[in-house]
Image (spheres, rainbow, N blue to C red):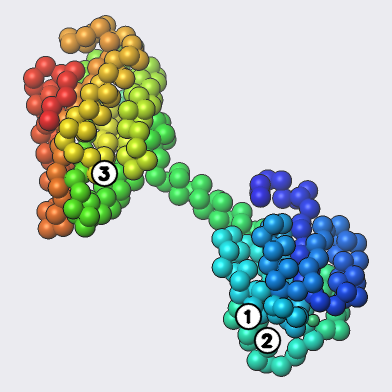
């Protein structure tokens, strides 16, 4: 499956045909091209072989006892990942209806018997190549999606992802009538920290703080995001005030236990956090911005009351 290993990886091809002689000829043709070949004698056996071997390509006869090729193909297509496994129908049926049906049930290509071997070789090669390209494209897309939603410095979600997720969870919690909490965290006297230790030390501090927040927000649905320069926001779906305050206190203590020196901080000799917490039962007619405004207000109070604290 590893895309980088693709050039040297041997493709597995599954031949499903009730005709023993045909299977043998196909096998010889494919093994000459150094493919790994598996055989099955009907659609049912073919389906089993498909599940156990996860071949890169299936060569499928149409007319077979027990389960025919059309049924076998449509069943293969219901399996996760089947979109990466091209099915090439090889059959004596030349009528339009059979060709149409093959493509309808998910076949990628169709060749008729008697087989033109040079053409088959090229079709097999092309189908495998296309499937590999498609897989690589999807992997690249996956990586890209990750990249556009992560903050480059701290590797937590970025602001864009935060906005998107908050909107989504706000609506989901409103539908399910569950609470949602938001924690806004801001590093205390961070400008002084930069002034004292330099911008690079500041960057490292941000990375460490981000990791601490990740440790504290443990549920799979929780999202830690970099909200702005030295501000982080944490979305806690299905979490009441009590739980959210606990998480926020855990964050404060995690950051304390990083024990990053901050000699110029008026509130401590170490880097500290101020946190504002809000919890609400969302309603679709209330704008999500009101949640952020309330958390911002709580954070402002935490600052005003002396920093290094959680305000709910
Ligand atoms: P307060 O306790 O009131 O929050 O004071 P503060 O100094 O933390 O707040 P202020 O908003 O005045 O300063 C934030 C500082 O965060 C200023 C800016 O240089 C720094 N900062 C923002 N983004 C980054 C970054 O990516 N890297 C580094 N090293 N510093 C950053
Ligand atoms: Mg047959
Ligand atoms: Mg700030
Ligand atoms: Mg600050």
Task: From the image, tell me which residue sits under label 2.
Answer: 99
- Secondary structure of the residue carrying tag 3 is strand
The residue located at (16%, 57%) in the rendering is 284
Q: Which mark is residue 103?
A: 1
Residue 178 vs 224, above or below: the answer is below
How far apart are labels 3 and 1 at the CA level? 44 Å
Near-viewer residue (220 or 208): 220
Residue 193 visible in the picture: no
Q: Is residue 211 left or right of residue 96?
A: left
Residue 74 image point, x, y percent: 61, 74
The label nearer to you, 3 versus 1, is: 3
The residue located at (78%, 48%) in the rendering is 8
Q: Earlier in the sequence, mark 3 or mark 1?
A: 1
Task: From the image, tell me which residue sits under label 3.
Answer: 237
Near-viewer residue (175 or 312): 175
Residue 126 image point, x, y percent: 74, 67
Q: Earlier in the sequence, mark 2 or mark 3?
A: 2
Q: Quadrant of residue 134?
A: bottom right
Q: Residue furthest front?
A: 66
Q: Is residue 154 left or right of residue 294?
A: right
């Amino acid at each position: 499956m590893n895309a980088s290993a693709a050039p040297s990886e041997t493709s597995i091809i599954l031949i499903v045909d009730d005709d023993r002689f045909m299977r043998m000829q196909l096998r010889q043709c494919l093994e000459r091209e150094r493919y790994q070949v598996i055989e099955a004698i009907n659609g049912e056996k073919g389906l089993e072989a498909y599940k156990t071997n996860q071949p890169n390509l299936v060569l499928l006869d149409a007319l077979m006892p027990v389960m025919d090729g059309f049924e076998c193909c449509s069943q293969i297509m219901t399996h996760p990942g089947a979109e990466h496994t091209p099915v090439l129908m090889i059959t004596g049926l030349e009528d339009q209806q059979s060709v149409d049906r093959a493509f309808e049930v998910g076949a990628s290509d169709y060749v008729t018997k008697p087989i033109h071997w040079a053409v088959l070789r090229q079709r097999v090669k092309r189908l495998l190549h296309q499937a590999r390209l498609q897989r690589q494209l999807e992997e690249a897309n996956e990586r890209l999606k990750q990249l556009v939603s992560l903050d480059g410095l701290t590797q937590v979600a970025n602001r864009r992802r935060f906005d998107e997720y908050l909107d989504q969870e706000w609506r989901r919690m409103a539908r399910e009538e569950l609470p949602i909490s938001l924690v806004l965290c801001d590093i205390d006297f961070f400008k002084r920290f930069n002034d004292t230790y330099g911008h690079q030390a500041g960057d490292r501090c941000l990375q460490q703080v981000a990791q601490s927040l990740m440790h504290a927000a443990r549920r799979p649905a929780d999202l830690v995001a970099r909200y702005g320069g030295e501000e982080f926001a944490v979305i806690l779906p299905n979490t009441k005030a009590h739980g959210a305050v606990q998480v926020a206190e855990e964050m404060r203590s995690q950051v304390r236990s990083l024990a990053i020196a901050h000699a110029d901080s008026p509130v401590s000799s170490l880097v500290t956090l101020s946190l504002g917490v809000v919890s609400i039962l969302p309603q679709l007619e209330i704008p999500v911005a009101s949640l952020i405004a309330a958390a911002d207000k709580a954070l402002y109070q935490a600052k005003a009351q002396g920093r290094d604290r959680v305000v709910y």
